[in-house]
Amino acid sequence: MLGYVLDEVFVHHHAPGGHPERPARVEAVRDALVAAGVRERGQNVPARAVTDEELGRVHRASYLTQLEATLPGQEGWLDPDTYYSRGTWPAARAAAGSVAELAIEVMSGQLTRGLAVVRPPGHHAEADRAMGFCIFNNVAVAAAAARAAGAARVAIVDWDVHHGNGTQRIFWDDPAVAYLSVHQWPYYPGTGAPTEIGGDAARGATVNVGLPAGSGDDEYLAVFDEVLVPALLEFRPDVLLVSAGFDAYRADPLAGMRVSRAGFAAMADRLRAVADRACAGRIVVALEGGYDLDGVAGGMSEALRALTAESVPAIEEAPAKRVISAPARAAIEATLAAHAEAA
Ligand SMILES: [Zn+2]
């Protein structure tokens, strides 16, 4: 059974002026998912506030104290990119709590899969600071919640066009949580080089593929087939979490990639197939970035389709190498070489 989170609380976080990370994003996703039959295909899971215990597993106490003193009922900026409004405190707590709840229910077997339409996004938020529109690291909180709920190993795949510096850093030395990212590189926030493979205690558990601007479906699917899927099958997670940003969409105003809706569909299918093979289907997809409304709505619709399909295409054992741009091919080789060297 798929559990999904769609809640009005996420609409009430808004910037003082115009900002690309805006309420219309979740409204567009909600409308598309409802039109796609989400209410018949899944079970609504009410948004819930994150607990202090859940936050405390990944965020510093000093940061939480600072937020509690600053955010509730107020508006302003935590950094040049990251605003808060009167609705932000409940939205941010609900975003982290809802992704954690889906992970917990997937671990307990109440749900098989989860889909979270939340904002603010999370993957740039570090243990002790907000960054890049993100306040709490929703997926990191969920990964820690899954661990507390019995998962020996958690894998996070992050296909947002930006590197998830916060998630990487939080689990840098944790061999129980793998972090795998494909992103535009070099680009904001600057991290995510192929040589970043994890700390001494967890070498190889961080996987970064930095694709050049202009990459599209073929480049992304080559990364999935040649790097991410094999790494996930080797890691054998108990649950798979997905930081699903849709700002690699070809019409996205913030980035320079050319992924189509069909590309996101194929990526979602692969992760559903990995979850089916490696972890009894347990997968939770959480919204991160994506600033073109058609891109984010279409992409999340494809995630819903992949998570609720009777079946998805099986993982090919030896997929043919795709013909991709030379810089993208070099990027894949750089990641594979960094990991081969560490092995
Ligand atoms: Zn992004």
Image (cartoon, rainbow, N blue to C red):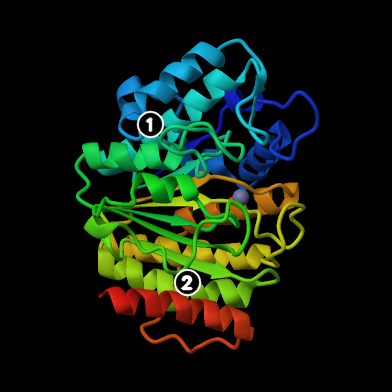
Position of residue 27 relative to residue 282, above or below, is above
Q: Is residue 180 left or right of residue 9?
A: left
Specify whether residue 285 is in view: yes
Q: Give the amino acid type for the residue marked by disc 1 in the picture.
A: His
In the picture, the quarter occupied by the C terminus is bottom left
- Quick one: 287 or 192, which is closer to the camera? 192
- Quick one: 303 or 9, which is closer to the camera? 9
**Mark 1 residue element:** loop
For disc 2, the marked residue is 224
Q: Position of residue 294 (x, y in %)?
A: 74, 51
Specify whether residue 3 is in view: no
Say which mark, if any, is on residue 296: none
Position of residue 225 relative to residue 178, above or below, is below
For disc 1, the marked residue is 59
Residue shown at the point (39%, 87%) measured from the top left: 318
Residue shown at the point (49%, 68%) measured from the top left: 209
Q: Residues within 10 Å of mark 1 (few under 14, many from 20)?
A: many
Quarter of the image where one finds residue 29: top right
Q: Position of residue 228 (x, y in %)?
A: 41, 69
Q: Is residue 5 left or right of residue 282?
A: right
In the picture, the quarter occupied by the N terminus is top left
- Quick one: 79 or 283, which is closer to the camera? 79
Q: Give the amino acid type for the residue marked by disc 2 in the picture.
A: Phe
Residue shown at the point (54%, 82%) measured from the top left: 330
Cβ(mark 2) to ligand 1 < 8 Å? no
